[in-house]
Image (cartoon, grey):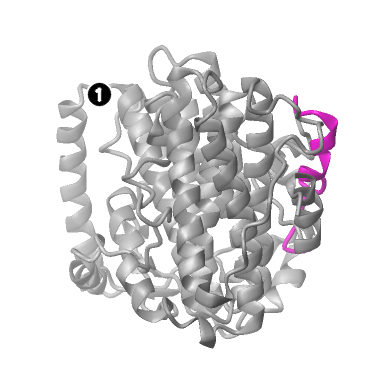
């Protein structure tokens, strides 16, 4: 395994873990107590520093956020339409999709408020994807399939943009905080479909063939420049499940395009 | 894999006072462990042996010395490595001593998660090489591995904490490749969190409940290393400090 050469060249050569005395540590732990309740990014902090400052947003960051906003528009309208479609979602699953829908609506509002006047307009959507999912709002299984594809795509989309947000710590953190929520959604919807919550290899499982692009590349076993096949005696399924893979903006838009009319 | 991959930081000699302090703490912990085991009705050989079962991590109080994570990206990766060690040790024990009436579906899920955490742990260990912190000693005396509620409740705590830790640590990383690597892992931790929460409260809003995801913003939590280490401290016998980690930009 040659991972050290590929990753360690970035690390500070002077560093070693440092032993400190237990007494010092106890003092430090005592100081930390009570800090737990505070999250790094509170809503108030975000509002104070980024809301209403859209003119100062660098173009590169605005582009990423508008890309994210387009995906959130898509998800938000998808779930609102589904919840409004009588007889679609079984009673016992309604609380799941109401929760997801609530988050997508919040994500749209959050991104729009950060972007301000730079926010892109909501496209018109066709959730049947030109007829491929013609009964998406009449057939619960079709709805679940599209939901899973959208959520797994969302996870990959945010992951692929993290590097483009590195210059802005606050916005990067917000994007990560959305990213993990999309992953929670994805896992729950997969479970409702009888799939594992995680992605094995590049398998789309029981999803129809048009969704394969959502999973292409997930079979990657090279992390940090090293081939992890055989690591700790684990199967390739376990190794690929342990790492979700990014998609580029172009790859995501090629998937999203199926659902965008104009 | 070359030999140095297996070597962590070499222990240094601590002064007498520190050793004594360590020993006192250990004795206190031992008493507490027995009491806790009683309280949970879990005083059986399996539960007690849990304390020695992790990858040969010994209960040797002379080795329970404080470890600092280091600075820069190395420190942040060691921080992740510490958390993955904790998770991997926990799920290894969960599968080694399954709670009563663990269903085959639950066993399959918990085994998958164990394997994912081992993959994360070993990736960091390998990547960090000589800069890796040593294997940490865990302290699971408050967990009743015979109890589904205790095991799943702890799993939920660890997974939510892991998600918040990675979310908060992303901005601390300078190298964009490490940021991507953290991103690849955090979404898997979030998938774990959702599935564990669903095992506890099936087909409810809990998988992304309002206690985890702020309903007003739709944002998961993001915590600083100091916050995360405070929350994790009861489960890690080896004291871990993060004195030189980068400071979050607020």
Residue in front for this viewpoint, A199 or B68: A199
Q: Position of residue A184 (x, y in %)?
A: 51, 42
Residue in front for this viewpoint, B41 or B87: B87
Q: Position of residue B223 (x, y in %)?
A: 37, 63
Q: Residue at x 61, y 21 (%)?
A: A140
Q: Is residue A202 visible?
A: yes
Residue corresponding to mark 1: B42
What subunit carries mark 1?
B
Q: Residue at x 44, y 68 (%)?
A: B11
The quadrant the N terminus of chain A occupies is bottom right
Q: Is residue B79 visible?
A: no
Q: Can you say whether B174 is above or below B226 in the image? A: below
Q: Position of residue A77 (x, y in %)?
A: 57, 44
Q: Tell me: A246 left or right of B95.
A: right
Q: Identify the image quadrant of residue A62.
A: bottom right
Count of labels in the image: 1
Residue in front for this viewpoint, B187 or B177: B187
Say few, some or many: other residues with alpha carbon within 10 Å of mark 1 (under 14 / 14 to 19 / 20 or more): some
Q: Tell me: A179 left or right of B235.
A: right
Q: Residue at x 72, y 63 (%)?
A: A224
- Segment tinted magenta in the rendering: A206-225
The quadrant the C terminus of chain A occupies is bottom right
Residue in front for this viewpoint, B182 or B96: B182
């Amino acid at each position: 395994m040659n991972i050290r050469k590929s990753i360690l060249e970035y690390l500070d050569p002077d560093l070693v873990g440092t032993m400190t005395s237990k007494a010092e540590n106890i003092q430090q732990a005592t100081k930390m107590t009570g800090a737990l309740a505070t999250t790094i990014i509170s809503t108030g902090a975000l509002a104070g520093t980024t809301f209403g400052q859209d003119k100062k947003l660098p173009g590169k960051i605005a582009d990423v956020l508008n890309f994210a906003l387009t995906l959130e528009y898509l998800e938000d309208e998808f779930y609102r339409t589904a919840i409004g479609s009588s007889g679609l979602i079984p009673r016992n699953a309604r609380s799941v999709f109401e929760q997801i829908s609530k988050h997508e609506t919040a994500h749209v509002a959050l991104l729009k408020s950060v972007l301000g006047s730079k926010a892109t307009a909501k496209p018109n959507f066709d959730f049947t994807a030109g007829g491929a999912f013609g009964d998406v709002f009449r057939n619960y299984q079709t709805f679940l399939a599209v939901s899973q594809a959208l959520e797994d795509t969302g996870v990959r989309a945010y992951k692929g943009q993290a590097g483009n947000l590195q210059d802005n710590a606050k916005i990067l953190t917000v994007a990560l905080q959305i990213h993990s929520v999309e992953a929670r959604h994805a896992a729950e919807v997969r479970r409702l479909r009888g799939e594992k919550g995680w992605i094995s290899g590049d398998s789309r499982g029981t999803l129809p063939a048009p969704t394969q692009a959502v999973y292409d590349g997930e079979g990657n076993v090279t992390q940090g420049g090293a081939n992890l096949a055989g690591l700790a005696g684990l199967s390739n399924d376990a190794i690929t499940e342990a790492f979700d893979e990014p998609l580029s903006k172009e790859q995501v838009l090629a998937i999203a395009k199926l659902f965008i009319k104009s | 894999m070359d030999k140095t991959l297996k070597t962590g930081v070499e222990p240094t000699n601590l002064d007498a006072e520190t050793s004594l302090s360590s020993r006192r703490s250990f004795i206190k912990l031992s008493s507490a462990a027995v009491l806790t085991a009683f309280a949970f009705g879990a005083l059986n050989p399996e539960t007690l042996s849990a304390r020695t079962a992790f990858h040969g991590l010994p209960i040797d109080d002379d080795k329970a010395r404080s470890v600092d994570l280091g600075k820069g990206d190395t420190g942040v990766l060691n921080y992740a490595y510490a958390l993955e060690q904790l998770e991997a040790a926990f799920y290894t024990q969960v599968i080694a001593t399954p709670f009563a009436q663990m269903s085959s579906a639950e066993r399959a899920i918990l085994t998958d998660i164990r394997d994912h955490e081992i993959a994360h742990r070993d990736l960091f260990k390998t990547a960090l090489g000589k800069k890796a912190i040593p294997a940490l000693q865990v302290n699971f005396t408050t967990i009743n591995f015979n109890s589904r509620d205790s095991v799943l409740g702890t799993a939920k705590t660890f997974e939510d904490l892991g998600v918040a830790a990675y979310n908060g640590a992303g901005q601390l990383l300078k190298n964009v490749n490490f940021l991507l690597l953290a991103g690849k892992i955090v979404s898997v931790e979030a998938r774990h969190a959702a599935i564990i929460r669903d095992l506890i409260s099936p087909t409810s809003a809990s998988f992304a409940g309002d206690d985890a995801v702020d309903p007003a913003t739709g944002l998961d939590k993001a915590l600083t290393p100091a916050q995360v280490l405070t929350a994790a401290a009861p489960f890690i016998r080896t004291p871990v400090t993060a004195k030189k980690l980068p400071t979050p930009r607020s």
